[in-house]
Amino acid sequence: MISLGVTFYFVSVYLLYATAKRVEYRKQAFSIYWESRPLLAKGLSLLFAMAGTALIASRIDITSALLSSLLIWPLLASIVVLFAPLLNKLRSVYIVLALLALLIGLIYL
């Protein structure tokens, strides 16, 4: 459940990153779609952040979940800002391998 909560945090951060107008990178269809719908993206981002906190709180207590969210969310935000522009340069094979590794991690929960 903690892995799924961190994944929800990642989706939350990436939705906010996709809607940011100050970020300059080669935008793909996902970013263009969410950039044209900023209110929906921000609402979904908040929903995913709350769901991630709830999932983490289901495994540990609420105080620890809130404190860990204060650590995990900015960490993921800095990782997204650092590595999202490199996503255009990576081949799709690496993306598929990363998704496969994430899937294996979620299966072994």
Image: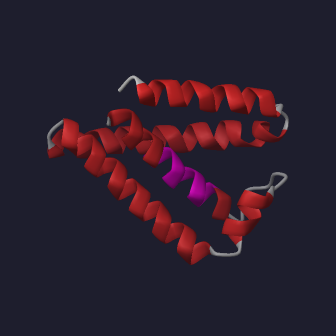
Q: Is residue 109 above or below residue 39?
A: above
- Residue 87: image quadrant is top right
Residue 71 appears in which quarter of the rendering? top left
For the point 50% across and 54% down, the residue is 12
**Residue 26 among those drawn in magenta:** no
How many discs appear? 0
Viewer-proximal residue among 79 and 100: 100
Q: Is residue 102 left or right of residue 2?
A: right
Q: Nearer the viewer, residue 67 or 34?
A: 34
Q: Position of residue 61 (x, y in %)?
A: 14, 40
Residue 50 in the image: x percent, y percent?
A: 34, 57
Q: How is the image coloured?
A: secondary structure
In what quadrant of the picture does the N terminus appear? top left
Quarter of the image with the C terminus in it: top left
| Side (left or right) of 59 relative to 47 | left
Relative horizontal placement of residue 49, taking residue 17 as reference (left or right): left
**Foreground pick, 77 / 87:** 87
Task: Look at the image and give the residue range highlighted in magenta.
Answer: 9-17
- Eyeballing the image, is 85 above or below 34? above
Q: Residue furthest front?
A: 107
In the displayed structure, 91 sits above or below 77; it is above
Q: Which residue is located at x 47 percent, y 70 percent? A: 43
* Residue 78 sits in quarter: top right
What secondary structure predominates along the stretch shown in magenta? helix
Residue 89 location, x and y as percent? 85, 35
Residue drawn at (70%, 31%) of the image: 96
